[in-house]
Image (cartoon, grey):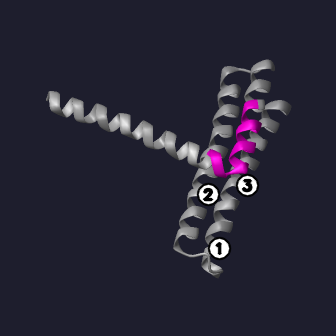
Amino acid sequence: MIEFVKSEIHRLKMTVVWSWQGWWAAWRTEKTLRQWTLANALSVLLAMTLDLTSTERALIIGFGLLILVAELLNTSIEETVNRISYVDHHLSKKAKDIGSAAVAVTAITAGLVWLIILIG
């Protein structure tokens, strides 16, 4: 049992390390991730200064974080496609465009959450 617990603790530690490495790899190379992170920081700051409920703040912060998730997934798609080939191909373009669309839809949703909270 103790070996199992040690193994799971090690696995958890490595998961944190690999996730951190993934974040920094994207941070170093993806300007859009840095831009969305700044937008999120400003969004959180504004949400904390306005007279909002805890639920409204949670929605704003949660949807803001989903933009970062979408951006990380989009970066992963782009890197994978580039790893396979730099040759222009309609399926490569399609995969990259769909990933970009996912970020856009997530950002629009976060914007709508802000709008609904502000006018509601």
Numbered disc 3: secondary structure: helix
Q: Name the residue under label 3.
A: 104
Who comes first in sequence, dot 3 or dot 2?
2
| Of marks 3 and 2, the one in the foreground | 2
Query: Which quadrant of the figure has residue 94?
Result: bottom right
Stretch in magenta: 27-41
Alpha carbons under labels 1 and 2: distance apart:
12 Å
Considering depth in this image, is 98 or 119 the residue closer to the camera? 98
Q: How many labels does the image show?
A: 3
Residue 39 is one of the magenta-drawn residues: yes
Q: Residue at x 64, y 47 (%)?
A: 28
Q: In which quarter of the image is the N terminus?
A: top left
Numbered disc 2: secondary structure: helix
Mark 2 and mark 3 in contact (Cβ < 8 Å)? no
- Three-letter residue code for mark 1: Lys
Q: Name the residue under label 1.
A: 94
Alpha carbons under labels 3 and 2: distance apart:
11 Å
- Three-letter residue code for mark 2: Asn
Who comes first in sequence, dot 1 or dot 2?
2
> Is the stretch drawn in magenta largely helix, strand or loop?
helix
Q: Name the residue under label 2.
A: 74
Q: Position of residue 116 (x, y in %)?
A: 79, 37
Label 3: how many residues lie within 10 Å, few (<14), some (14-19) or many (20+)? some
Considering depth in this image, is 40 or 109 the residue closer to the camera? 40
- Three-letter residue code for mark 3: Ala
Q: Position of residue 107 (x, y in %)?
A: 73, 48
Taking 17 as reference, is 98 above or below it? below
Mark 1 and mark 3 in contact (Cβ < 8 Å)? no
Q: Quadrant of the C terminus?
A: top right
Residue 51 appears anywhere in the view:
no
Residue 103 appears anywhere in the view:
yes
